[in-house]
Image (cartoon, helix red, strand yellow):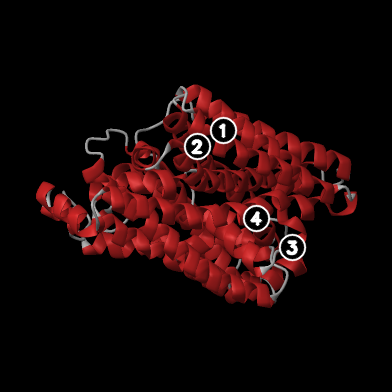
Amino acid sequence: MNAEALVPLIILLVIIFVAGLWASRYMTSSTSFLQDYFLGGRSMGGFVLAMTMTATYGSASSFIGGPGVAYDKGLGWVLLAMSQVATGYFVLMVLGKKFAIVTRRYQSVTMVDFLKSRYQSVWVVILSAISIILFLFSLMAVQWIGGARLIESLTGLSYMSALFIFAVSVLVYVTIGGFRAVALTDAIQGTIMFIGTLILLIAVIIAGGGIPNIIADLQAENPNLITPYGPDRALSPTYVSSFWILVGVGVVALPQIAIRAMAYKSTRSMHRAIIIGTVVVGFIMLNMHLIGVFARPILPGIEVGDKVMPLIALEVMPAWLAGAVLAAPMAAIMSTVDSLLLLVSSSVIKDVYLNYINPRASNKTIKRMSIGMTALLGVIVFMMAIDPPQLIIWLNLFGFGGLEAVFLWPVIMGLYWKKGNKYGALTSMGVGFGLYVLSHYFYPNPFGLHTVVIPVVAGFIAYVVASLITVKKTGLATDI
């Protein structure tokens, strides 16, 4: 075991546990448990909001899978990855103040809460909950696998031992602290990510003899590694452009990101978060994917792409510093998985149990079931992560696309188009879900586009047509 590298990770986990225990003190009031546990009392300032969005979005896919693909695809993947820069900007500008006002009026705790109040449909809630549980389980499995592989590569432990350590660490502090613990530790983790990626990129550049020397080595191996198209020329302009819908505009529909737009405390906080979040996301994404590309001449022949990050860190830095720097991707992974756990837990407890099974449940029962469900979900995902794929990024992007195909138009059109109704929402969700799954398995990347594009376009048409056809029957769904 690499004890020197393990110490900084242990320190990080201790800090997280302390934060979780501290945050749990704020949930003693039984009258506001749901608001506190799932939204942190809607009290986030600008810096915390920016960092929690960055840390939640910057997941195992970005910090473990992303550099692994960049290692294989070259600078073309860096260009593609930079389409994520506008993520925080789009989420807060499109949803922003209007979403915060409407969800407060509806007293919504989850995105499905908003859809339930907006469309007044049991089937919208059920289809939403099913979609969240299905696609978020794949996203959560990605985080478990990424965290375990990082610990495995860094310490020399077996994959199963590393998976167990990661799972226990996350479950303890999420179940006791809820969203407030997540938001607090996200601020810490986002800062670690910002500093850690910069240190590692500098170390990799020095180890490679400088950027000109690294580029020359890449060109000597395969000239396409330094073009926008990749070594197999698979990154066509059409694919790269359409990928922006998946990781740029479409991120508005991701429940784990959209819920952040419910939880800030003021308009000033939102505006500050837009600026900070855009700068931090751009900085981190550029650094992480450049590290993956620049690692190729230094450590050629890495077979499991998800191990590029920890292996290059151990190669170019002392073990203790590598452990400190790799606290950055560990921070990203933990902050994403805790948010996803809370989101699925809230879908089961708030959106299904309280709405349709036991609406009169006591606060004590709600608290016990919320904590129990979060722990149970963690155990289920642990079982799913036992047999991991070679590259987790594809599993992550599958979950992203599915959520966007289902939720993009019911959320956006529900906010901004009064004629939108439950028939439009249900039709859009069904069309988006069905086309995405069918296309993913039977006809991926149609016409050179990313798989998500056609389901998103078809979902928009379905929403508008179905709403207009039925508007005389239903009238305006709501006045917002």
Most foreground residue, 89 or 405: 89
Horizontal side of 229 relative to 341 (left or right) equals left
Check if mark 2's residue and mark 1's residue have beta carbons within 8 Å.
yes
Q: CA distance from mark 1 to mark 3?
A: 28 Å
| Residue under pointer 1 | 166
Q: Position of residue 110 (x, y in %)?
A: 68, 55
Q: Which mark is residue 112?
A: 4
- In-front residue for pair 239/154: 154
Rendering coords of residue 321 (x, y %):
46, 42
* Eye-nearest disc, 1 or 3: 1
Q: Relative to 158, is 24 above or below?
A: below
Circle 4 Cα neighbour tier, 10 Å, few/some/many (<14 / 14–19 / ≥20) = many
Quarter where residue 105 is shown: bottom right
Residue at 46 percent across and 38 percent down: it is 146
Circle 3 residues within 10 Å: few <14, some 14–19, many ≥20: many
Q: Position of residue 310 (x, y in %)?
A: 40, 39
Return the residue at label 3. 42
Whichever of labels 1 and 4 marks the residue nearer the N terminus, that label is 4
* CA separation in Å, label 3 and label 2: 29 Å
* Mark in the foreground, 4 or 3: 3
Sequence-wise, the earlier of marks 4 and 2 is: 4
Amino acid type at image mark 2:
Gly
Q: Residues within 10 Å of mark 1 (few under 14, many from 20)?
A: many
